[in-house]
Amino acid sequence: SQSKILIKGGTVVNAHHLEVADVYVEDGIIVTVKPDIHVGDDVSVLDATGKFVMPGGIDPHVHLAMEFMGTESIDNFFSGQAAALAGGTTMHIDFVIPVNGSLIAGFEAYEKKSRNSCMDYGFHMAVTKWDEIVSKEMEILVQEKGINSFKFFLAYKGSFMISDELLLQGFKKCKSLGALPMVHAENGDAVDEGQKRMIELGITGPEGHALSRPPVLEGEATARAIRLASFINTPLYVVHVMSIDAMEEVAKAQKSGQRVIGEAVVSGLVLDDSWLWNPDFSIAAKFVMSPPIRASGHDKALQAALSRGVLQLVGTDHCTFNSTQKAFGIDDFRKIPNGVNGIEERMHLVWDTMVESGQISVTDYVRVTSTESARIFNIYPKKGAILAGSDADIIILNPNASFEISAKSHHSRTDTNVYEGKRVKGKVEVTIAGGRIVWQNDELKVVPGSGKYTEMPPFGYLFDGIDKADANYLSSLRAPVKRFKSTA
Ligand code: DUC
Ligand code: ZN
Ligand code: ZN
Ligand code: ZN
């Protein structure tokens, strides 16, 4: 049951503004934001004095119950979302994987998977092959199913990877539909070569994962995708920028005026690849994800890029496999299911790493963890804001509390945590999702089926003025040269 809630005396933070105010919530919607609100006895009052009241996090990059590398990621839509809520994230956008190449069949499978959701969610769609049917399915998904983003994999040769020829078709189709193309940017052919090289050298452990797909392959694919997006004149979203190489390509394109969004993920900001050399396989394997976590130095550079605005938002790529699943690759790193946790830790790690350290402001924190996701995927200000009329997805963060991250206390179903033992300053003490208090006093009260599918409409702000740019381009082309046959 949804109740009436008044949050009193906190500092209310939006991406553009911060003020001390009360927030009154009724029927899942924020009704009023102003100082000194008075209410009756039927309202639950939360005291937020000395704390920050902020929009719940929106994780733009998650893989719950994903069928991948011969297994399925262990957090399903219920357990992954429960973990998210305990960490102050109130919405995620998951990647639908096609079924036998069919986007619609994939969408229907994900409708089933997400039935027990306990928080709001949206979908991106992965495109893993190309033909007339796929093209038609993209139209249906945009026009009728609330999807406005499509992800193309330049890696995973033999399964998800698509050629440049198909990528161009996909970019064109996205643009015509007002949908945002996204790329996983690693050169899949070169990764395949790198893996063979490692196996030939007898490097079969988790460090071989990092060595087989170095930053240069991420830089190459990022540059290629950005240039092809420029050629089509479409906006582009580069998921999980993990290296200086890729980040610099994004920065260069942005500087030239191209509409390229760079997504950071928490693991790339906070971790380094030294873990992959750990002699204990079960520890090293936890850190295997793609693109790989990079050598020390990349993390700090990515943090700086986030604070400069070259990277606009932070996701997780949350895709968890337990120790048993990770052990599939005990003799061969190529068989270790790729993925790390993060959906529960993201809000805390970004606060601790970026705000506590003074690298970004509190308003910027809201922007990179919530508002920017909502703006890019065209659901702002329903999501990503503490404004009258917005969904009541709200967190109360105490900047003076601290705690230690551990698999012993986390809510994910996986048995390990890549941030094990890390102490963070700042703690989400209350999470309100859809007007319900779901996290308070370290207790979760989540309701299966209470989360709603959030449709994301096409033609978000990244498409503003694209038509005009195309018209300018066409009018800039010179008329064809009139040629005659030489008589000489
Ligand atoms: N990378 C991962 O680490 N996991 C899921 C998919 C991906 O691209
Ligand atoms: Zn008063
Ligand atoms: Zn990816
Ligand atoms: Zn991913």
Image: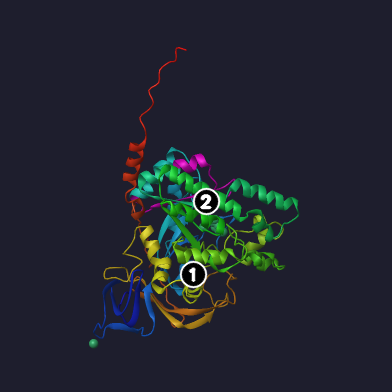
Q: Residue at x 52, y 56 (%)?
A: 248
Residue 5 point in image, percent of width and height: 31, 79
Q: Is residue 430 magenta-colored?
A: no
At mark 1, the secondary structure is: helix
Q: CA distance from mark 1 to mark 2?
A: 24 Å
Q: Quadrant of residue 486?
A: top left
Q: Which residue is mark 2?
A: 222
Q: Amino acid at mark 2?
A: Thr
Colour scheme employed for the rendering of this structure = rainbow
Q: Which residues are magenta?
A: 144-169
Residue 76 visible, this angle: no
Mark 1 vs 2, N-terminal side:
2
What is the residue that sits farthest to the front in this orientation? 488
- Local SS, label 2: helix
Q: How many marks?
A: 2
- Crowd band around label 1 with a 10 angstrom C-alpha radius: few (<14), some (14–19), many (20+): many
- In the displayed structure, does residue 58 sit left or right of residue 304? left
In magenta segment, residue 152: yes
Amino acid residing under circle 1: Arg
On residue 288, the disc is: none
* Residue 394 drawn above or below residue 253: below
